[in-house]
Each structure stands twice: as C-alpha cells, then as structure tokens.
Amino acid sequence: MLKASVISVIDDDESLRLSTASLLRSMGYAAECFESAEQFLESSNICRFDCVISDIQMAGITGIDLVRILRSRQKKTSVILMTGRAEQSAVEQALISGAICVLKKPFAAELLLSCIEDVIHDNGKV
C-alpha cells in the first residue's frame, strides 16, 4: 500500500482551511492545517509535505513570500497558491516566485485536485 501524500493547507480563513483539508482527506490525502505561513515554517520537519496549498494574501508572510522562503532554503516542495484578488499582477508574481498553480477563489474542487495530481505525479509519487 502506498503512503498517502501529505499536503499542508495554509490560510487565515478558518472555514476555507478546514473545508480544503476535508476535501483532501476525502480524496485519500493526508492534510495538515496552518493559519499562517509563520506557523507552517515553525512546524517540525516541513520536508514531510509533498505539496503546500497557501493563500496569497495573509497578514505577515504572504503566500508569495512563503514560496520565496522555501526556495531560498533549497526546499523543493511544490506550492499551489490561492487568491481572492482579481489583479493579474498578483497571479504573475505568484508564478514568477515559483508557484506551480495559482487558483482564483472561488475555484472548483476539481481544479484544485487536478493541480495536486499534477504536482504529485511530477514529484514521482504516482
């Protein structure tokens, strides 16, 4: 039996964070929730995550900053960013930072799952 991929969900919106984690668990993934990028970065062994899903706009460290921090630490963890902002510049900045996918809220669950499958497949987990 294959070990379930471990995905972190980082969002300061508790309802979105919990519903996303619930969706992931229902699809067979292991999910851990964090209410901020700081809380995620302070957690033990962040290398255990196969994928990070993070909001872009958060107080403190933003999702884009989180991607940059992970890259500066040589972490190859794939990051999917979410945003409620409509500006194309935010999406462009997210992609330039190294995010694998950028989803505009609200998004269909199938779109998120498709991004995750691409990430997990590209990382050799499938």
Image (tube, rainbow, N blue to C red):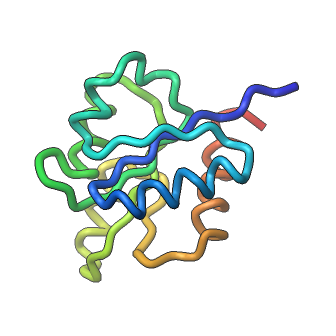
Query: In front here: 66 or 108?
Result: 108
Count of residue discs: 0
**Residue 122: % across, % down:** 66, 41
Quarter assignment of residue 22: bottom right
Q: Please give left or right for residue 72 compared with residue 126 in the image.
A: left
Screen quadrant of the N terminus: top right
- As rendered, which of 115 and 21 lies closer to the eye? 21
The one of 83 and 14 positioned closer to us in this rendering: 14
Residue at screen point 67% across, 42% down? 29
> Where is residue 28 shown, x and y percent of the image?
73, 44
Q: Residue at x 42, y 55 (%)?
A: 17
Residue 36 picture location, percent across and down? 25, 44
117 versus 66 height, above or below: below
Q: Is residue 76 left or right of residue 43?
A: right
What is the quadrant of the C terminus in the image?
top right
**Residue 117 higher or lower than 3, as above or below:** below
The percent position of residue 81, horizontal first and vertical second, equals 39, 57
In terms of image quadrants, where is residue 7? top right
At x 75%, y 26%, the residue is: 3
